[in-house]
Image (cartoon, grey):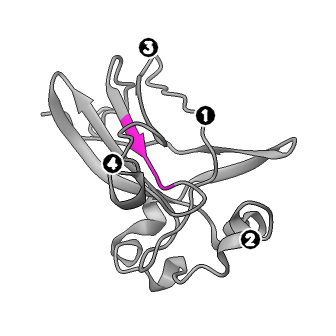
Amino acid sequence: MDARTCRPIKNAVVDVWHADAAGVYSGFGDGAGSRTFMRGLQRTNAKGLALFRSVYPGWYQGRTVHVHVKVHVGGNILHTGQLYFPDSVTDAVYRRAPYVQRGDRTMRNADDPIFRDGGTRSMLRLRRSGSAYVASITMGVRRR
């Protein structure tokens, strides 16, 4: 949504990426051989909606569980940020395979330095859908 007018932004490109269950990012470290897993781009529709299907993000040392996001309009990056999950949901997910095999994560939301700098405004709303979760957030971005 346009932060000033609260109107949907059609054809914005939303770019997301996150770690897999093992805490690996594509293009880096153990994931250096691939540049595309756990990454995606979608254009928003006339209602400003972009939809992604993925797995629950993994964790890595020193960070809480999160998804990176960028919003591009007309070739300009209007927003760069991170999206977060409630600790209680992450705890439940991480008690199941394949996440449980890594052991306890090292960082919770309240202890993460980036989350502490406004992460509550970037908390995803989650609802159950069968054995999965559906996450949503309305993001206001400033057009240039």
User: Is the residue marked by circle 4 packed among few (<14), some (14-19), or many (20+) residues within 10 Å?
Assistant: few
**Residue 12 as seen in the image, left or right of residue 126:** left
From the image, state whether disc 2 or disc 3 is nearer to you. Answer: 2
From the image, state whether disc 4 or disc 3 is nearer to you. Answer: 4
Q: Where on the picture, by quarter, is residue 45?
A: top left
Per the model, the C-alpha gap separating discs 4 and 3 is: 32 Å
Per the model, the C-alpha gap separating discs 1 and 3 is: 20 Å
Query: Above or below — where is 113 with respect to 8?
Result: below
Q: Main secondary structure of the magenta part?
A: strand
The residue that disc 3 covers is 46
Query: Above or below — where is 53 with respect to 24?
Result: above
Badge 2 element: helix
The residue that disc 4 covers is 27
* Residue 100: mark: 2
Badge 3 element: loop
Mark 1 or mark 4: which comes first in sequence? 4
Mark 4 or mark 2: which comes first in sequence? 4
Q: Name the amino acid type tagged 4.
A: Gly
Residue under the image location 40 percent in, 36 percent down? 36
Per the model, the C-alpha gap separating discs 1 and 4 is: 20 Å
Q: Name the amino acid type tagged 2.
A: Val
Q: Name the amino acid type tagged 1.
A: Arg
From the image, state whether disc 1 or disc 3 is nearer to you. Answer: 1
